[in-house]
Image (cartoon, rainbow, N blue to C red):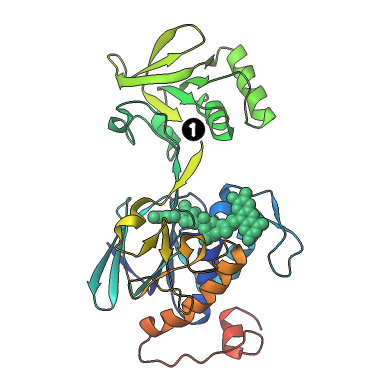
Amino acid sequence: MTDHTDVVIVGAGPVGLFAIFELGLLNIKCHVIDNLDKPGGQCAELYPEKPIFDIPSRTSITGQELTDNLMRQVKPFHPVFHLNQQVEKVEKLNDSEWVISTNQGKIIQAKCIVIAAGAGSFVPRKPPLEGIENFDGKTVLYSVKDKSIFKNKTVLIAGGGDSALDWTNELSKIAKVNLIHRRKEFRAAPDSVSKMLELEKNDILSFFTGQLKGISAGSNKSLKVQYQDNENLHYIEVDYLLPFYGLKMELGPIVNWGLNLHENKIYVDTEKFETSVSSIFAIGDINTYPGKLKLILSGFHEAALMAQVCFKYCFPDKKNVFRYTTVSKDLHKKLGFK
Ligand code: FAD
């Protein structure tokens, strides 16, 4: 089923979130797509606990607080979020509409597209194993969406960070879990590590040090995974392999959307923040222009100017009257301020 809206925002980082607000002030409705499982982009994924000192009027605010505040600020505009999915295709439907499709089969029709994709999609770091792509999404999974599929199964989890340790401990309740990490020291929270070691001591799970070396179809179970410790090569047969090696950012499908790119950034003008294709805009870290500064506050400014131009595409017959939020009764009503 196709959804219909005024604007699709690609990316729910701080700049994509603020764009919802600026567009909302002008009565423009948005759907927002992000391939992370939560909004906030780099702020929420890379530095949720770190203080940011250059958000105007905030002497200090953490990445997560900024995200939470932005989410509160956009609430009156009822944006529709589609998380855990990557925008793959952008196609022109007619002179005034686009069709946007995601890798999860979501299709949205919109008048404008705002690309707020930062440095690109956050995607999992994959172990460099030949042929792993044959198992990706089936028996090799990089995130857990439905843990019930692991019930009574044999699972190999690889990694030493929070995701690896949290899922090792959690899935041990329903599955036979093996954890592999290249050394005995972990980056995960000490609590999770102690819990895992306790479960290992009680033979509830197995932990071994080593590195993944190969993957093929198994004979008893679906996967045969080869790994190496200090001395020898070993094999283990499992139903699922869950590599948790963290995330990296890559531009992804944006390169195929026919936009004018410069060193993996989208070229825009500084009046409208429009790309080389009319009614497709790019704001925040993803764009480039002379003097560009990759700062959150620059992205906020870009969002405000972009919204003014979007209005013309969304409501070609209406006149946009500029209003301050302080004095406009109409805006107060929209924002729920009495
Ligand atoms: P991002 O935050 O990168 O969000 C983009 C989102 O788009 C991501 O969630 C991504 O998953 C999603 N996405 C991309 N492609 C697709 C696709 N095809 N489909 C679906 N989703 C997609 N800036 C400051 O101003 N002050 C600071 O003090 C500061 N400190 C920083 C500290 C660190 C450690 C880092 C890493 C950055 C810091 N920055 C700081 C930079 C700031 O975080 C970025 O400028 C800001 O996050 C850019 O916001 P954005 O919304 O443009 O992109």
Quarter occupied by the N terminus: bottom left
List the single residue furthest toward the top: 231
Label 1, secondary structure: give it: loop
User: Visible in this render: residue 13?
Assistant: no
The structure residue drawn at horizontal position 49% and vertical position 6%, both measured from the top left corner, is 231
The image quadrant that residue 213 belongs to is top left
The amino acid type found where label 1 is placed reads Phe
List the single residue furthest toward the left: 94
For ligand 1, give the image quadrant.
bottom right
| Nearest to the observer: residue 337 or residue 37 | 37
List the single residue furthest toward the right: 59
Up the image or down, 87 lies above or below 153; here it is below
Q: Horizontally, is 161 left or right of 222 in the view?
A: right
Quarter occupied by the C terminus: bottom right
Give the percent coordinates (x, y) of residue 326: 66, 86
Q: Mark 1 points at which residue?
A: 244
Dot 1: within a 10 Å radius of its alpha carbon, few (fewer than 14), some, or many (20 or more) residues?
many
Q: How many marks?
A: 1
Disc 1 C-beta below 8 A from ligand 1: no
Give the percent coordinates (x, y) of residue 252: 37, 50
User: Visible in this render: residue 230?
Assistant: yes
| Nearest to the observer: residue 282 or residue 148 | 282
Give the percent coordinates (x, y) of residue 330: 57, 88
Q: Horizontally, is 79 left or right of 191 in the view?
A: left
Up the image or down, 324 lies above or below 130; here it is below
